[in-house]
Amino acid sequence: MDAKHEVKETPMSRLHVHIAVADIDKNIGFHSSLFGSEPNVIKPDYARWGLQNPS
């Protein structure tokens, strides 16, 4: 590929996913296990994980 058509890849710095669930506590447990960390923020109807290097 010549320099005129070169594509630069930039790593993603953030991803937001919203999932509506019936049982927030059960899903916090599931996602904590999946991500290998507890949420940074927990509210009665919301949980947020601030993952530095999601894989």
Image: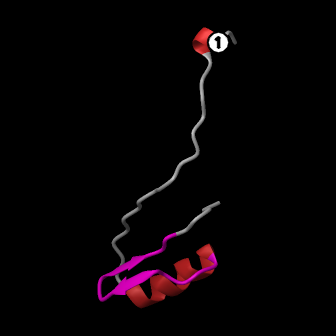
Furthest-right residue in view? Answer: 1
Residue visible at 55% across and 68% down? 51
User: Is 18 located above or below residue 1 in the figure?
Assistant: below
Task: Give the image quarter of residue 43.
Answer: bottom left
For the question of whether residue 24 can be seen, the reply is yes
Image check: 29 left or right of 1?
left
Point out the image quarter for the C terminus.
Answer: bottom right
- Estimate the x, y position of residue 27 in percent, counting from the top left: 46, 82
- SS state under label 1: helix
Total count of labels = 1
Query: What's the magenta bit mostly, secondary-structure-wise?
Result: loop
The quadrant holding residue 46 is: bottom left
Answer yes or no: is residue 23 visible: no
- Label 1: few (<14), some (14–19) or many (≥20) C-alpha neighbours in 10 Å: few
The verdict on residue 40 being magenta is yes
Give the percent coordinates (x, y) of residue 2: 68, 9
Q: Which residue is mark 1?
A: 3
Q: Quadrant where the N terminus lies? A: top right
Q: Is residue 44 left or right of residue 28?
A: left
Using residue 48 as the reference point, say whether residue 12 is left or right of it.
right
Q: Which one is nearer the viewer's eye here, 14 or 30?
A: 14
Looking at the image, residue 53 sits to the left or right of residue 19; the answer is right
> Quarter of the image holding residue 54?
bottom right
Q: Residue at x 30, y 89 (%)?
A: 44
Residue sticking out furthest to the front: 3
Q: Check the image and tell me how it is coloured.
A: secondary structure
Q: Which amino acid is tagged 1?
A: Ala
Residue 36 image position (x, y, % from top left): 64, 78
Give the magenta range. 36-50
Q: Position of residue 37 (x, y in %)?
A: 59, 80
